[in-house]
Image (cartoon, rainbow, N blue to C red):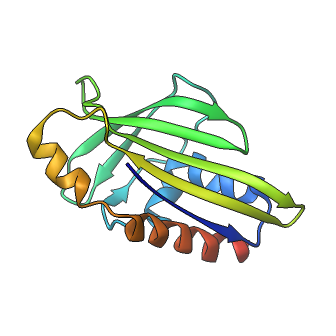
Amino acid sequence: MVSASREIAAAPDVIFELIADPAQQPRWDGNGNLAEAAAGQRVHAVGDVFAMTLGNGAVRENRIVEFEEGRRIAWLPSEEGKAPPGHLWRWEIEPIDAGRSTVTHTYDWTNLTEEKRLVRARATTADKLAASIERLAILSEGA
């Protein structure tokens, strides 16, 4: 499991909207992994599922397993029509004041069991998560 955190000069709801709307995610993806997501998939609750097309053309279904509007969201990705293999992406936003927030991005692969997936998971380092937060900061601070 890896994580990264930093302060962003934006309100939690501004930041959260960029995360909870999958169509916005390729704009801030620091892993260079995401290509596009159809508009209209904004997440609202645990149990929601959104589809994301990766850079290689594969589509992932992402099941929301944690959700608190404006504060926390986490999902388990999987191949279309398959059970999630066990890795989780989480975003947590803590307000500092009306215009500043601390954002923490976590990638947790502790429940993965397939060696092929573990190799790629371990290659996702804290600096890649920090790159996503940095891009998210640029987008949200300019909003």
Q: Does 106 appear above or below 40?
A: below
Q: Nearer the viewer, residue 111 or 136?
A: 111
Residue 106 place in picture, x, y as percent: 47, 51
Q: Nearer the viewer, residue 78 or 59?
A: 78
Rendered residue at 57%/25% (across/down): 46
Q: How many marks?
A: 0
Residue 49, above or below 1: above
What is the quadrant of residue 71 in the picture? Answer: top right
Q: Residue furthest right?
A: 98
Residue at x 33% of width, y 60% of height: 35
Q: Position of residue 67 (x, y in %)?
A: 62, 32
Extreme-left residue of the structure: 116
Please indicate, yes or no, whether residue 67 appears anywhere in the rendered image: yes
- Residue visible at 77% across and 67% down? 10
Q: Residue visible at 24% across and 35% down?
A: 112
Q: Position of residue 78 (x, y in %)?
A: 28, 34
The quadrant where residue 143 appears: bottom right
Q: Is residue 30 visible in this depiction of the protein? A: no
Q: Quadrant of residue 102?
A: bottom right
Would residue 36 appear left or right of 96 to someone viewing this image?
A: left
Residue 20 vertical position relative to residue 79 in the rendered view, above or below: below
Left or right of 83 in this view: 18: right
Please give left or right for residue 101 compared with residue 59 in the image: right
